Image (cartoon, rainbow, N blue to C red):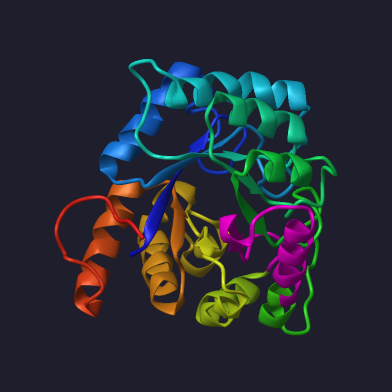
Amino acid sequence: MTQLMGIVNVTPDSFSDGGRFLDPEGAIEHARELVAEGADLLDVGGESTRPGARAVSAAEEIERVGPVVEGLCGPGAGAVDVPVSIDTAKAAVAEVALDAGAEMVNDVTALRSDPELAALCAERGCGVVLMHMKGTPRTMQEAPEYGDVVDEVRAFLAERIEFATARGIAEGRIWVDPGIGFGKTVDHNLELLRRLSELRELGRPIVVGTSRKSFIGKLTGREVGERLGGTIASNVLALHTGADVLRVHDVAQVEQAVRVAEAIRGRGSGQPGRAST
């Protein structure tokens, strides 16, 4: 069954909830709420990757996420019973998070940004999410073009899997993400979601993140806080076309939609409770 990855943004400028959980205690409490709502794992990030977002230093990123990961993974009362992922492209940040108890690195650059990150992940034996992105968060939406977007994304991810395994990362620990909204137009995003099953040829679990994204706003005319319906629709259809993990802000609502969808398809029990693979 599908897993839900709850988003914990510890940033002042993320496109959807920037600044809401910048305080570590607030972020930890929010993360605990996501788990109570049905999140199977949590993805903690300290640098916004929205289009045009400014880059931050490793030190600043560590200052934001370090206390949150420690609080979620440590021995204290705030600890959660689900795995924690660190959303970063920096080895220094990943190292701090892994030391604190994180079990996965979610890198939007697919190990292209920091030459030390692949070796660190191999050494620690952690999970790794490799995501497709054309350009950088600062440039990715500047007229992205593809021949066949699905073919190009699949070829890119295949190459990054080969890169990761060549550096000692066990293939069984790798997940892939087509990068919805990262260097893609609305049509590119829709094509990827329609043909998500073609990425299953890679043999790795597929992560999909459509939550509240701008393509939903462009299709519906809705602002960020009004995109729950589009988020649910895109996630349920991604589930149908091959997604294994859904990265979402609104865990309770998506969990309910996924549970009902899987029950209709005969894949789940239809009973309340956390989704799992």
- Magenta span: 155-184
Measured as percent of width and height from the top left, residue 175 is found at 58, 59
Measured as percent of width and height from the top left, residue 28 is found at 42, 24
Q: Is the N terminus in the top left, top right, bottom left or bottom right quadrant?
A: bottom left
Magenta region includes residue 69: no
Q: Residue at x 26, y 73 (%)?
A: 267
Identify whether 147 is placed above or below 192. below
Q: Residue at x 76, y 66 (%)?
A: 162
Identify whether 169 is placed above or below 160. above
Q: Is the C terminus in the top left, top right, bottom left or bottom right quadrant?
A: bottom left
Residue 219 lies left or right of residue 182; in this view the side is left
Snapshot quadrant of residue 184: bottom right
Measured as percent of width and height from the top left, residue 275 is found at 30, 56
Snapshot quadrant of residue 237: bottom left
Judging depth in this view, the residue of 58 and 187 nearest the camera is 58
Judging depth in this view, the residue of 133 and 51 nearest the camera is 133
Identify whether 277 is placed above or below 240. above
Q: Is residue 168 visible?
A: yes
Q: Residue at x 37, y 55 (%)?
A: 228
